[in-house]
Image (cartoon, rainbow, N blue to C red):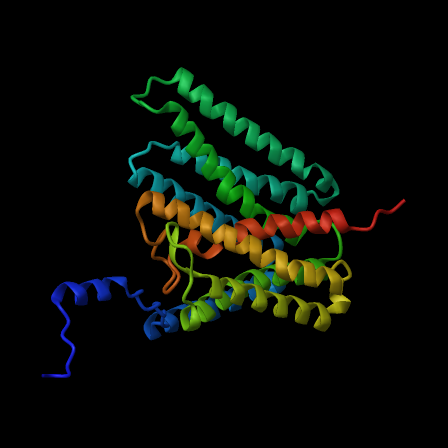
Amino acid sequence: MSTETSTTPGTLSGAVAAAPPPASKARIDPRTFAKRTASWVALWLSALLLVYHAPPTLALIFVALFGLAGQWEFYRAQEEKGHKVFKQSGLFCGALIYACTWYFLIDHPEKARFVHFGLELVLVGTLLGAFIRLVVMDEANREPITTAALSFLGLMYVPFLFNFVALLAFMPGDIAENRFLLVYLLAVTKFADVGAYVIGSVVGRHKMIPRISPGKTWEGFAGAILTSLAISVALALLMDRHAQRLSLSSAVILGVLLPLISVVGDLAESVVKRDASIKDSGHTIPGIGGALDLIDSILFTAPVLYFYLQFTAPVHP
């Protein structure tokens, strides 16, 4: 009698089906990594030149260009999905946001306290204008409320939120400190992306929210927080004389808070892209994508840093 144990085909297939699939382990694509690294170096050099050497008006123009490019990409994604948006009107109102910031913070800094009044005026005017257009103009539009909502969302989501970068850069106070805080914002936010990408690609196994972004993992999420925390504390210690408003305790709080918000911003853009069935918002930046792919996390971290500094600023009698 043979001592070999036979296995029926049904038993074998059942055993294979019952076995859990091996966890997939992402790897870094060398070509994508090289393109992304080259883009990062070029973008960082450009950002540092703008922050420390460009005239304020020129720096604001570059902020406005990225904000309006991201807004245009958002509108284009909605159009590809079949929605109608007021693209030209929305971009014009987005430009008004940056014009308002320029007027109150650069051209007339003595009126800086009115900058938020001006921004609120632009937002109210935009919303009123959208509804007036729907009422007055005879347009073949089966979804008028969706059109108005998406047009206004594009304005709020991209140029309005990205304008907080300009508010940080040109808010009243020490110019040197403002420059440092802007570099701090960019470093803590974007190195969170680096930490998430590298750690997630090397050891990432557990998907974070696969229905929204299949490539993001919890390991990458942890890498983002640890990287940002290290950068935040290091900058606060190395540049303490330029960061009177950034204590060590604040550096620790922001080093955890900003990457958390950065991930939210990244996932928010993933929702937009997934809804429109597109992989990237554009193809203008090698290895990264479009303008919205570049600034998606900053859209959320810039307001958080701005309000944190406002709420923690010492009250003068």
Q: Is residue 174 above or below residue 91?
A: below
For the point 29% across and 21% down, the residue is 140
- The one of 118 and 267 positioned closer to us in this rendering: 267
Q: Is residue 173 above or below residue 287?
A: above
Residue at the farthest front position: 1
For the point 55% across and 49% down, the residue is 300
Quadrant of residue 82 in the image? top left
Q: In the image, is 194 to the left or to the right of 121?
A: left
- The one of 257 and 72 positioned closer to us in this rendering: 257
- The one of 49 and 180 positioned closer to us in this rendering: 180
Give the position of the N terminus as an image quadrant.
bottom left
Q: Is residue 279 above or below residue 255?
A: above
Residue 57 can be seen, yes or no:
no
- The one of 56 and 225 positioned closer to us in this rendering: 225
Quadrant of residue 236 in the image? bottom right
Residue 170 in picture, x, y percent from top left: 66, 51
For the point 48% across and 66% down, the residue is 219
Residue 57 in picture, x, y percent from top left: 59, 51
